[in-house]
Image (cartoon, helix red, strand yellow):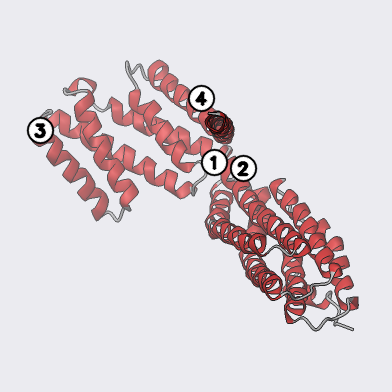
Amino acid sequence: MRQLELRAFDLSERTIRRGEASAVRRIERWRQRAFLIAQCSVTAGVAWLIASLLLGHEVPYFAAAAAILVLGMAYGQRLRRGVDVAIGVTLGVLLGDLWLVLFGAGVWQVVLVCAIAMSIATLVGAGPLITTQAGTNSIAVLVMAPGPIYGFDRWVDAAIGSTLALLVATVAPSAPLRKPGEVAGRVVAGIADTLEAAADALAAKDEHAASAVLDRVQATEKDLATFDVAAAEGLDVVRYSPFRRRELGLAVALSGLHQPLDSAVRNLRVLVRRCVVAIWRGEEVPVAYQDLVQRLAKACRFIAHEFSEHRLPKTAKDPLREIAEATPHLQLTHSISAIVILAQIRSMVADLMELTGMEYVEARELIPDMD
């Protein structure tokens, strides 16, 4: 009975912890999307106001709906996708209005107007996004108002909402500009986590902990896979928005960081595997080597913070240079794994120096030869 009570208490405690963790994740997700929610809400209201007060449209639904669709797609994505959605929405609504005036609404009308709208979008070279938007919005016109009482008001509303959303997306496209730095920061923070876990496993000579560190490398690789897309989105916004040209230098610099980040993660994978091998074989990895891994992790923490603040980590050069200058004075051991770990530390320092704005050749020259 006592064991059942303890087990029930343990289950309830775990349920509470999971509930709290879920609530934290939900709140964090809302915080990340709060700016998008505010942008869409305000833009939809302004689009409705323009269509109703200035143009006298009674129910300008498509003005608000188009604003939300276009702005939602442009937020955190390439601005070009927002343009695609805007074209698809306005094309679909225009064809729906025209079809309603000429043929009315019904089952066969829905079938034909959808087919025609999607066919026209395809023939003019549109992608899947424009094509599907054209089809869905042409049907929406027939379903929502089965009669030509509004004429072409809804197409005008859609054009107003789409145009307004694209204007807002070029004035305040903050998410695509922040995202490359945030992703780069996550990658480098993942490297720091992995280095710290590897050093701890070496110190404790814990084979299971060392094997678990490999999973951290895989998580970091997943973040790296999204970096190219995020960097391209940032460049896209800078090119299209005349209000963000001052950030062109940073956007270009961030877009060139994939190679050093990829190299750092590859070298990290080799380092972690050697830690696992060293523990499994009982090879001795000097404490000085472990301390160097911890120092490298600390430098990665600083680099990740700079990226998260939307800055290039130029001031990280000094701690990285100090780590590089410390490596040639360490005593070499008879452990092959320890020597490989030291070599990977030196290689990772060069990779991380590139993140500060250095060229690879310059970074390699700052790493002294071994004594």
For marks 1 and 4, the one nearer the N-term is: 4
Q: In this view, does 337 lie above or below 44?
A: below
What amino acid does circle 4 point to? Val
Q: Name the residue under label 1.
A: 170
Query: Mark 1: which secondary structure?
Result: helix
Q: Residue 107 carries which label?
A: 3
Q: Nearer the N terminus, badge 4 or badge 2?
A: 4
- Circle 1 packing at 10 Å, graded few (<14), some (14-19), many (20+), is some
Question: Which residue position is annotated with label 2?
Answer: 243
- The residue indicated by pointer 4 is 42
Check residue 335 in the rendering and tell me which mark sits there, or answer none. none
| Mark 3 surroundings: few (<14), some (14-19) or many (≥20) residues within 10 A | few
User: Which mark's residue is nearer the viewer, 3 or 2?
Assistant: 3
Contact? badges 1 and 4 (CB < 8 Å): no
Q: Quadrant of the C terminus?
A: bottom right
Q: Distance between the residues labelled 3 and 4?
A: 36 Å
Going from N to C along the chain, the mark reached first, 1 or 3, is 3
* Of pointers 3 and 2, the one earlier in the residue sequence: 3
Question: Distance between the Cα atoms at labels 1 and 4?
Answer: 15 Å
Local secondary structure at mark 2: loop
**Residues packed near mark 2 inside 10 Å, few (<14), some (14 to 19) or many (20 plus):** some
Real-space Cα separation, disc 1 to disc 2, in angstroms: 7 Å
Give the amino acid at mark 1: Thr
Q: What residue type is labelled 3?
A: Val
Question: Eyeballing the image, is 171 above or below 212?
Answer: above
Disc 1 + disc 2, Cβ < 8 Å: yes
Residue that appears at 38% across and 32% down = 66
Q: Name which residue type carries label 2.
A: Phe
- Secondary element at image label 4: helix
